[in-house]
Image (cartoon, coloured by chain):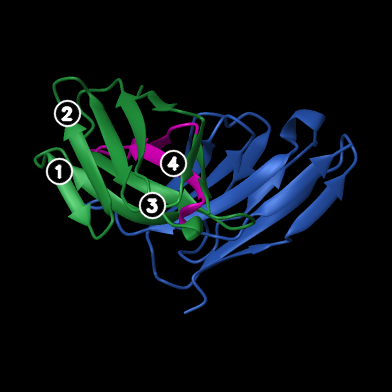
Amino acid sequence: NAGVTQTPKFQVLKTGQSMTLQCAQDMNHEYMSWYRQDPGMGLRLIHYSVGAGITDQGEVPNGYNVSRSTTEDFPLRLLSAAPSQTSVYFCASSYGVDSSTDTQYFGPGTRLTVL
Amino acid sequence: GENVEQHPSTLSVQEGDSAVIKCTYSDSASNYFPWYKQELGKGPQLIIDIRSNVGEKKDQRIAVTLNKTAKHFSLHITETQPEDSAVYFCAASLRPLVDSSYKLIFGSGTRLLVRP
């Protein structure tokens, strides 16, 4: 298993540009999520999905869109990038929501800089 | 919603000493508390977790304690080694879920440095 993969690893955007961060997992996990990590602020949940076709907002959803057309993929879209979106983005997946444990498997991250 | 506070933000210890990281949570319904370790340039990895029906859990040099009444939980690392140097995150959640409103909330992280 490759686990959770993310592309690209690094990205530089100009203000106003759009892009999609890709995330895929091959563990047949129902739950997938996107976090952003900023210095001193830990990991903040952007959007999450409890299964294909179902998405919901996390703590900081503004400026980001997601979709979940398949179990494996959970892309994160920035429609109009802003400098405040400069961050490291992590995708994570875990077993179904009826599981009593919650081991999140994180991808390697995407470091995004918005100029 | 849930809010998790973590202290200290940085911790420096001598190799062989113990390290303790503390977290408090706000939502008394939370019943699942994992700890993650993040090494430089990598995503976080689960190192230990505890459920609210247990007061303490150990795994070799790592232990976690939970005080439900006070709503705080702690990570204890004994006999620290240089490879323990990393950022540690606590988190709180409700598992299993009663509906799809799922949020795993993380603390702000502790940077642990173990000096040789």
Please provide percent x and percent y for residue B78. 31, 50
Question: Which circle's residue, 4 or 2, is located before the other in the chain?
Answer: 2
Q: How far apart are marks 4 and 1 (CA)?
A: 18 Å
Q: In this structure image, what is the colour of chain B?
A: green
Name the dominant secondary structure of the magenta segment. Answer: loop
Task: Look at the numbered discs 4 and 2 and tell me whether their residues touch, using CB distance below 8 Å.
Answer: no
Residue to which mark 2 is pinned: B67
Q: Which amino acid does label 4 sit on?
A: Phe
Confirm whether circles 1 and 3 share one chain.
yes
**Disc 3: which chain?**
B
Q: In this structure image, what is the colour of chain A?
A: blue
Q: Is mark 4 on a helix, strand or loop?
A: strand
Q: What residue type is labelled 2?
A: Asn
Question: Which circle's residue, 1 or 3, is located before the other in the chain?
Answer: 3
* Residue drawn at (81%, 53%) of the image: A11
Find the magenta span and give its range.
Answer: B84-108
Label 1: how many residues lie within 10 Å, few (<14), some (14-19) or many (20+)? Answer: some
Q: Foreground: B112 or B13?
A: B13
User: Is residue A70 in sight in this rendering?
Assistant: yes
Confirm whether circles 3 and 2 share one chain.
yes
Q: Is B57 on the left or on the right of A38, as rendered?
A: left
Please provide percent x and percent y for residue B30. 23, 32
Confirm whether circles 4 and 1 share one chain.
yes
